[in-house]
Image (cartoon, helix red, strand yellow):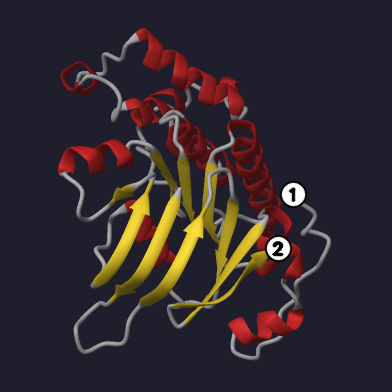
């Protein structure tokens, strides 16, 4: 699914690498959490996978396609198979839940009709199935700006689902939510990933949530991978190494998600 080799990302030639990964692969159907302190390179890592940030050197392959060397048409095809969920939702506030989720079909629909809001029957069916799956049927015709944060993030999940993605990238998807809503959204993402056997890569600030809702954890520090293993093997001592000696609470009542 994802193959990275000799990757280096720099924000300026005279600055140290923001990301430096020698070798990393993520298989189809994996549920991966990327953790690390602020500035460790978590968002840069996800932005590289989506193709938003071009590396200084190295290779990133998604579904066998080199994101930065393949022809534009091939890269566009791969990008349509990647759904992305943002920290701040990135919905159109004045549009309804239904309209926002339909936007997930823009990449697969015919250009002119979709720009006019004229989606085909198949696109509308897929969007409606996504709304049903995230439990927003009763809010389908409500404007996004009237929803709570947790509800808006469910819309964002449904929009990603409407793409029928092979890979879902979630960049700090719960950092703006309270603990209860954060757990609900991560539970939903876990269920979606398992049901569709898609690949899920999410960056998380809270290690306890990574342990609860991911099966594999990648720990970044100063742009480098310092841990990569099953969630259950992440210990307090490893965490102190990732976070520079700071003691962190790994296990509490909130960290009870399904694996």
- CB within 8 Å, label 1 to label 2: yes
Q: Looking at the image, which is closer to me, 131 or 61?
A: 61
Tell me if residue 132 can be seen.
yes
Q: Which structural element holds mark 2?
A: helix
Residue 171 drawn above or below residue 127: below
Residue 119 drawn above or below residue 214: above
In the picture, the disc for residue 102 is none
Q: Looking at the image, which is closer to me, 218 or 144?
A: 218
Residue 184 drawn above or below residue 222: above
Question: Number of callouts in the render?
Answer: 2
Q: Looking at the image, which is closer to me, 221 or 23?
A: 23
In the picture, the disc for residue 259 is 1
Tell me if residue 95 can be seen.
no
| Residue farthest top in this picture | 121
Q: Residue at x 53, y 44 (%)?
A: 28
In which image quadrant can residue 214 be found? bottom right
Q: Position of residue 146 (x, y in %)?
A: 48, 36
Q: Residue at x 22, y 19 (%)?
A: 110
Label 2: how many Cα within 10 Å (few below 14, some 14–19, many 20+): many
Q: Which structural element holds mark 1?
A: loop
Which of the two labelled residues, at mark 1 and mark 2, occupies the earlier sequence position?
Answer: 2
Q: Is residue 214 left or right of residue 198?
A: right
Q: Is residue 237 left or right of residue 99?
A: right
Residue 32 drawn above or below residue 141: below
Tell me the CA gap for discs 1 and 2: 9 Å
Q: Position of residue 61 (x, y in %)?
A: 35, 53
Q: Which residue is mark 2?
A: 231
Q: Residue at x 64, y 32 (%)?
A: 195
In which image quadrant can residue 76 be found? top left
Q: Residue at x 71, y 65 (%)?
A: 208
Q: Looking at the image, which is closer to me, 230 or 95?
A: 230
């Amino acid at each position: 699914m994802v193959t990275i080799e000799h990757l280096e990302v720099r924000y300026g030639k005279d600055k140290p690498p923001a990301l430096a990964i020698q070798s990393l692969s993520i298989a189809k159907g994996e549920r991966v959490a990327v953790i690390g302190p602020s500035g460790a390179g978590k968002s840069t890592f996800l932005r590289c996978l989506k193709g938003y940030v071009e590396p200084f050197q190295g290779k990133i392959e998604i579904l066998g396609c080199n994101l930065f060397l393949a022809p534009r048409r091939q890269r566009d095809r791969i990008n349509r198979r990647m759904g992305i969920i943002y920290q701040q939702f990135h919905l159109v506030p004045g549009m309804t839940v239904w309209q926002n989720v339909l936007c997930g079909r823009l990449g697969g629909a015919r250009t002119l009709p979709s720009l006019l809001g004229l989606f085909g029957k198949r696109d509308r069916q897929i969007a409606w199935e996504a709304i049903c799956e995230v439990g927003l049927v009763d809010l389908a015709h409500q404007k996004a700006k009237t929803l709570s944060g947790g509800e808006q993030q469910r819309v964002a999940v449904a929009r990603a689902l409407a793409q029928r993605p092979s890979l879902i990238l979630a960049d700090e998807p719960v950092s703006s939510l309270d603990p209860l809503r954060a757990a609900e959204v991560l539970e939903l993402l876990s269920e979606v990933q398992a049901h569709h056997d898609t690949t899920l890569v999410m960056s998380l600030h809270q290690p306890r949530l990574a342990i609860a809702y991911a099966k594999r954890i990648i720990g970044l520090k100063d742009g480098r991978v310092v841990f990569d293993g099953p969630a259950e093997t992440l210990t307090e001592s490893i965490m102190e190494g990732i976070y520079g000696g700071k003691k962190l609470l790994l296990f509490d009542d909130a960290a009870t998600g399904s694996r």
